[in-house]
Amino acid sequence: MRSSVKLLFALVILAACGGSSHNDAPSQLDNACAIIAQRPAYLNAMKETERKYGIPVASQMAIIYQESKFRPQARTPVRYSLGVIPMGRQSSAFGYSQALDGTWEEYQRKTGNSWARRDRINDATDFMGWYMTITNERNGVALADTRNQYLAYHEGHTGYARGSYNSKSWLVRVAGEVADRAVMYDAQLRACGRLS
């Protein structure tokens, strides 16, 4: 009996140590090839989204990096009143793509993908492809224009159309960084033979 309890305890400890590895971000976020080597499912999901919607893999990766640092259960920080009283999160953004509750529900409704989850890479990249395709249709932003796609992703279709980002110099700077990261990721993925 004692050995059974010890074995069960050891199995619980092992499961606890190894079970959350895919809930953590990949270890080398500045190296697209290392990210894909560590999480091959990412490339499969992103290539599928590229085939379905035309959004380049490197653009998807750069936006996911900016939004969640590849953490499947990323959330916005909690706001505090008087520095100590928790007042809830800054927004309902969640998961790889940091999709808001309402936008995610619209995606589920319009695509019929009611079982989609924001913490699954396949669903998150499909959401991004869906959203960015609408940005292309409504705002005329090219699918491969990472900078402007990111601005519309952040500000929403209406906000982007109004040019709300023009009064946010920090956001314009971040959008430039996202575009630069997409170029870097693309070059890395081509160098290691992951993109044809």
Image (cartoon, rainbow, N blue to C red):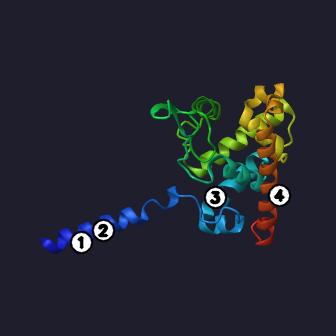
Q: Residue at x 18, y 71 (%)?
A: 4
Q: CA distance from mark 2 to mark 1?
A: 6 Å
Seen from this angle, which residue lies furthest left?
1
SS at badge 3: helix
**Pointer 1 and pointer 3: residues touching (CB < 8 Å)?**
no
Say which amino acid is labelled 3: Tyr
Q: Is residue 95 above or below residue 105?
A: below
- Residue receiving disc 3: 42
Quarter of the image for residue 15 reads bottom left
- Give the image location of residue 132, x and y in percent: 76, 39
SS at badge 4: helix
The label shown at residue 183 is 4
- Residue receiving disc 2: 11
**Pointer 2 and pointer 1: residues touching (CB < 8 Å)?**
yes
Q: Residue at x 50, y 34 (%)?
A: 83
SS at badge 1: helix
Number of the front mark, 4 or 3: 4
Quarter of the image for residue 91 reads top right
Within 10 Å of the Cα at label 4, are there few (<14), some (14-19), or many (20+) other Cα atoms? Answer: some
- Give the image location of residue 144, x and y in percent: 84, 48
Say which amino acid is labelled 4: Val
